[in-house]
Image (spheres, helix red, strand yellow):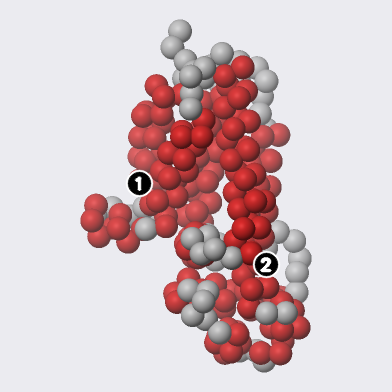
Amino acid sequence: MIRRDWIVRKPVNRTKVHIAQAAIELFSRQGFGSTSIREIAQKANVNSALISYHFKNKQGVLEMIMIEYFENLFERFAVQRIERTTEAFNYFDELMKIVQLLIRYQCEHIKVTRMIQRELSVDSTLVREVMSTYIAKLKALFTSLADEGISAGQFRADLNQDMKLIHVLSSIFFPYFNPQIIREVFYVDPMSEEYIETYIQYLANIWRSQFVREN
């Protein structure tokens, strides 16, 4: 793992990693559409032909970055799910563990997070594939947890899952897609441990009554 930069889940060609790191710097600063293969090659100090060899084209670079980002994220979700204990399982606590994992993951890889969120706003074949694979998978993760919580009698039966999920994801993503707004308007650093802990606790406080069934 390369902290606050890019995640490599398994051993890969170091040249590919170097090219991807250079691309992340450029994509995050000037956008995917405004970055050329030549600029990536110059930033990585490699020949443009080497990028074509490893990735075929610029979209291939972006695709590899996105896949590694999301695959690593879902591997972490899987580990957290395996560690569940069946005794006195609390579904709201599990929800907040997922929220905390997502928030900290974004902080850990903030450049890639912002780059991906920006590119997801542009309609393209790659973006549609990412949405149908990974964003849909994220929705399924939350929906499954909500269904289990309702079945267990812990979550409210009248929970509007789709609307609540949009609210949850917006709360998770906004501070890290727009950290400059949080810093310049609210004068706090969304990357700081104090902010992260305070924000997660705040979300738990306001969501508890919206999710949890009253006894």
The answer to whether the residues at label 1 and label 2 have Cβ atoms under 8 Å apart is no
Q: In the image, what residue type sits under mark 1?
A: Tyr
- Nearer the camera: disc 1 or disc 2: 2
Helix, strand or loop under label 1: helix
- Horizontal arrangement in the rendering, residue 28 relative to residue 22 (left or right): left
Quadrant for the C terminus in the image = top left
Identify the residue at image location x=23%, y=56%: 185
Helix, strand or loop under label 2: helix
Identify the residue at image location x=60%, y=29%: 145
Q: Which residue is mark 1?
A: 195
Instruction: Please identify the quarter of the rendering in which residue 15 is found.
Output: bottom right
Identify the residue at image location x=64%, y=64%: 125
Q: Which residue is mark 2?
A: 64
Q: In the image, what residue type sits under mark 2?
A: Met
How far separated are the C-alphas under marks 1 and 2? 31 Å
Is 190 above or below relative to 40? Answer: above
- Horizontal arrangement in the rendering, residue 45 relative to residue 16 (left or right): left
Residue 192 appearing in the image: no
